[in-house]
Image (cartoon, rainbow, N blue to C red):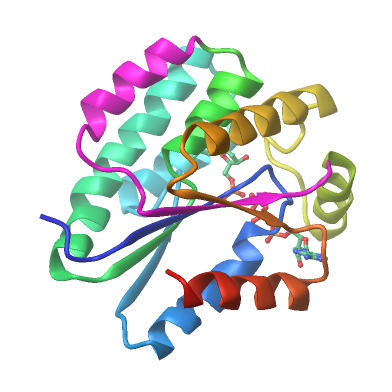
Amino acid sequence: MKPGKFITFEGIDGAGKSTHISFVASLLHDRGHTVLTTREPGGTPLGEKLRALLLHEKMHLETEALLMFAARREHLAQVIEPALKRGDWVISDRFTDATFAYQGGGRKLDRRKLEALERWVHPDLQPDLTLLFDVPLEVARSRLEKSRDLDRFEQEQAAFFAATQAEYLRRASEFPERFRVIDSSKPISDVNQGLVRLFEEF
Ligand SMILES: Nc1ncnc2c1ncn2[C@@H]1O[C@H](COP(=O)(O)OP(=O)(O)OP(=O)(O)O)[C@@H](O)[C@H]1O
Ligand SMILES: Cc1cn([C@H]2C[C@H](O)[C@@H](COP(=O)(O)O)O2)c(=O)[nH]c1=O
């Protein structure tokens, strides 16, 4: 069912993943692939409305997790699955690992509930490659504060991001076949060079 490849970018807020998506997209485009870049929560008109709620409205933790998966269901149906079927390469700025990291790790929602939602929403699809941008918490925080006004997640305390990052790293060791951890405390040009090397082998 899936001639295209599905690549996801993950990391705590300010880790630098969005900065490197267009670089990787143009690298893959130069290799002859049709590349679609998208993001979560979001990626569809309905998903973007849910994103606005998720990033700015206070809500119950389980509502938050359910809305993340509702936006994802729409994203898969409208964007990701048709693109992969056509043979396009899809790069998503976040996917289900973010829900395990933020709602599971950061907010402590029982992982079994998230696993049940994952089995419901995408039982047969996992990313072919997940790039985890890893950076010390204080570096991420200082990059964010310099760059923009902070949303509901970005305003969380250091302990929340420490738990979120720990869950990302735990998942990277649980699924080593698809995760690659990128040291994004390095300058942007060094991170780009590392990405060029990584994609020579992918
Ligand atoms: N390696 C780097 N060195 C220095 N600054 C960086 C680096 N990577 C990203 N930045 C800067 O840090 C800020 C945040 O980067 P970016 O938006 O890519 O992070 P992000 O991981 O996508 O965060 P979010 O998930 O909150 O969108 C931007 O101003 C960006 O220019
Ligand atoms: C997919 C997803 C996202 N989040 C959080 C993580 C970020 O703080 C925001 C998205 O903002 P970004 O700047 O585009 O990265 O949403 C989450 O908590 N759970 C998720 O599943």
> Which percent across, then down, holds residue 180?
56, 53
Instruction: Compare residues 60 and 8 and report the one nearer the observer.
Output: 8
Left or right for 95, reference 138: left
> Which percent across, then down, holds residue 120?
22, 24
> Which percent across, then down, holds residue 200?
49, 77
Residue occupying the far left of the picture: 1
Image vertical order of residue 82 relative to residue 113, above or below: below
Is residue 120 on the magenta stretch? yes
> Which percent across, then down, holds residue 83?
21, 64
Instruction: Compare residues 14 and 129 and report the one nearer the observer.
Output: 129
Q: Residue at x 44, y 48 (%)?
A: 178
Image vertical order of residue 96 relative to residue 67, above or below: below
Instruction: Compare residues 167 and 158 and report the one nearer the observer.
Output: 167
Task: Check the picture and name the quadrant holding the N terminus.
Answer: bottom left
Ligand 1: give its quadrant.
bottom right
Q: Residue at x 83, y 28 (%)?
A: 158
Q: Which residues are magenta?
A: 110-136
Q: Residue at x 45, y 23 (%)?
A: 65
Left or right for 101, reference 202: right
**Residue 42 visible at all:** yes
**Residue 54 visible at all:** no
Q: Residue at x 60, y 29 (%)?
A: 170
Q: How many marks?
A: 0
Left or right for 45, reference 189: left
Is residue 184 on the magenta stretch? no
Instruction: Compare residues 185 and 66 and report the one nearer the observer.
Output: 185
Task: Check the picture and name the quadrant holding the C terminus.
Answer: bottom left
